[in-house]
Image (cartoon, rainbow, N blue to C red):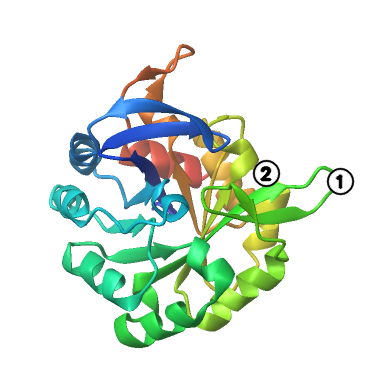
Amino acid sequence: MIQARVIPCLLLRGNGLVKTKKFKDAVYLGDPVNAVRIFSDKEADEIVILDIDASREGREPNYELIAEMAGEAFMPVAYGGGVRNLEQIRRLIRSGVEKVVINTLATESTDTIKAAVEVFGSQAIVGAVDVRKKLFGGYSVMAKSATVDTRLNLQQHIQSLVQAGVGELFINDVERDGCMAGFDLALVRSVSQAPVSVVVCGGSGTLEHLREAVHDGGASAVAAGSMFVFHGKHRAVLINYPKAAELENIFSK
């Protein structure tokens, strides 16, 4: 029996699908709608779609594109990027999104999260945190696609998200993004102490990395980007997702 969700994380830039490394050097991959269709055909557990420019540029989500992607998905869809108010959350849910991911806004105030939980339920709201390891220890909470250091304490910020009522946390490791060298298990263990479901992202390159995040780190679920869009040492673009038997085998060890 599969013990944890394994979630492809897709990054939007404009109308295209990209993949970053340490939140920089975005490589164009192709049509995001087609990518969602392929992951749906491969029976991915869920899918997370993040617009990496929306909050930084101060613009709203691209509702038309989001609706088109959600229409191709036969699994739960989470969307994040540019979310600032209840009406936007309502429009996203009407577009076919099951979960709305809130990141930058939550570093300023959790009031919108509290209001959204009251209206839509905690299961529909995900608190996302972009984390960067500090040079001399500890972690920084980043915002606006990791271009702004909020100076917030990581554990206190996580606690504030939980108290605001989020049903899930999505923790993204900036320094390991796209590196495919494994998770920062110390970070995973730390954030996985939260009393809600915790999805960790940033660093996965193998099935063993996924297993480590869950079994050794205590994560509820794992998300990956590069691992599911690149193939081979030359990082050729190839949408892929493990078969159910492979996941069952790795998590049963």
Q: Nearer the viewer, residue 32 or 3?
A: 32
Residue 151 at x, y percent in the picture = 72, 61
Compared with residue 244, is residue 84 higher up or lower down, i.e. above or below? below
Disc 1 marks a residue whose amino acid type is Phe
Q: Position of residue 178 (x, y in %)?
A: 53, 32
Q: Which residue bears the numbered disc 2?
A: 184
Where 178 falls versus 96 (above or below)? above
- Residue 212 placement, left or right of 61: right
The quarter of the image holding the C terminus is top right
Q: Residue at x 55, y 35 (%)?
A: 208
Residue drawn 34% across the image and 21% down it? 237
Total marks shown come to 2
Q: Which mark is residue 43?
A: none
Q: In the depicted view, which residue is nearer to us: 199 or 206?
A: 199
Residue highlighted by disc 1: 136
- Name the residue located 40 percent from the left edge and 78 percent from the top edge: 122
Q: Secondary structure at mark 2?
A: loop
* Label 1: few (<14), some (14–19) or many (≥20) C-alpha neighbours in 10 Å: few
Earlier in the chain: of badge 2 and badge 1, it is: 1
Q: Is residue 82 visible in this depiction of the protein?
A: yes
Q: Nearer the viewer, mark 2 or mark 1?
A: 1
Q: CA distance from mark 2 to mark 1?
A: 15 Å
- Which residue is drawn at the image coordinates 32% and 41% (left, top)? 244
Q: Is residue 206 visible?
A: no
Which residue is at the far bottom? 118
Is the residue marked by circle 2 packed among few (<14), some (14-19), or many (20+) residues within 10 Å? some
Instruction: Name the secondary structure under disc 1.
Output: loop
- Look at the picture and state if 168 lies above or below 44: below
